[in-house]
Amino acid sequence: MRIDIVTGLPKLLESPFEESILKRGQEKEKIQLVVHDLREYAHDKHKTIDDTPYGGGAGMVLKPEPIFECVEQLCRERAYDEIILLSPGGEKFDQRLANDLSLKTNLLLICGHYKGVDERVREALVTREISIGDYVLTGGELAAAVLVDSIARLVPGVLNDSESALSDSFQDGLLGWPEYTRPPEYRGKKVPEVLLSGDHADIQEWRERQRLERTKTRRSDLLNTDPFR
Ligand code: ADE
């Protein structure tokens, strides 16, 4: 899978893609992440990518020309399954959407910034608009990093067997069970006996009960939604 990301702030995306599982996924050539600097598509000597909004008001709006030129250039090179604008006004991102997007071959993400993006970008280029939650970030870059991280780890071969995404919280609509590691007692708190018993059936039963209990108390809304919707 290849994901291209168009941004006015490419530095914001450097370190998230250069660590841990995303780094390894790229090294193993399971995923290709390519960041494009919008300023390279600006025409004036100041490399302007934003301007004041028509009609007045606070903040700056991303200009259409650099985004159109960058996206059109990329579309000449390959066909994209989706061209996604990150913005707080988009459909809410969740595990189901991450699963769907992880099945695609080429994704193009556009990071909105400042006050917004010229509406003509939305009308002509974007196939889907996604928000990572009901709060406003200063731009779409951190949201793009969230999307990339959650999608890339679902691509076959990115995680190894012991990290398998199939046992993730949310994959079947429930939260995860409590995990413990050594030592068996720390500051007077003991690891539950069953986990030390070596009885796999008992352990599995305990874990499933814990997940259900946790989901009921913390996120009862999840119990009323079909995870395979
Ligand atoms: N840009 C600003 N806020 C955002 C959000 N919540 N999701 C995606 N992109 C954003």
Image (cartoon, rainbow, N blue to C red):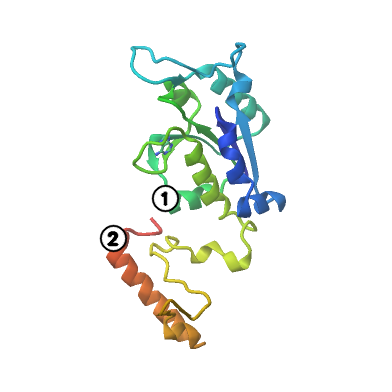
Nearest the viewer among 188 and 166 is: 188
Amino acid on which disc 2 is placed: Asn
Q: Is residue 103 above or below residue 219?
A: above
Q: Which mark is residue 94?
A: 1
Q: Residue at x 61, y 20 (%)?
A: 41
Quadrant placement of the C terminus: bottom left
| Mark 1 within 8 Å of ligand 1, using the beta carbon | no
Residue 11 in sight from this viewpoint: yes
For the point 34% across and 13% down, which residue is it? 56
Q: Is residue 11 left or right of residue 89?
A: right
Q: For mark 2, does the 10 Å Cα neighbourhood hold few (<14), some (14 to 19), or many (20 or more) residues? A: few
Q: Which residue is at 42% across, 64% downward?
A: 172
Given the image, on which type of amino acid does mark 1 rest?
Answer: Asp
Label 2, secondary structure: give it. Answer: loop
Q: Residue at x 51, y 40 (%)?
A: 144
Residue denoted by label 2: 224
Give how far across and how far down residue 183 sits, in percent: 52, 78
Q: CA distance from mark 1 to mark 2?
A: 15 Å
* Closer to us: 97 or 179: 179
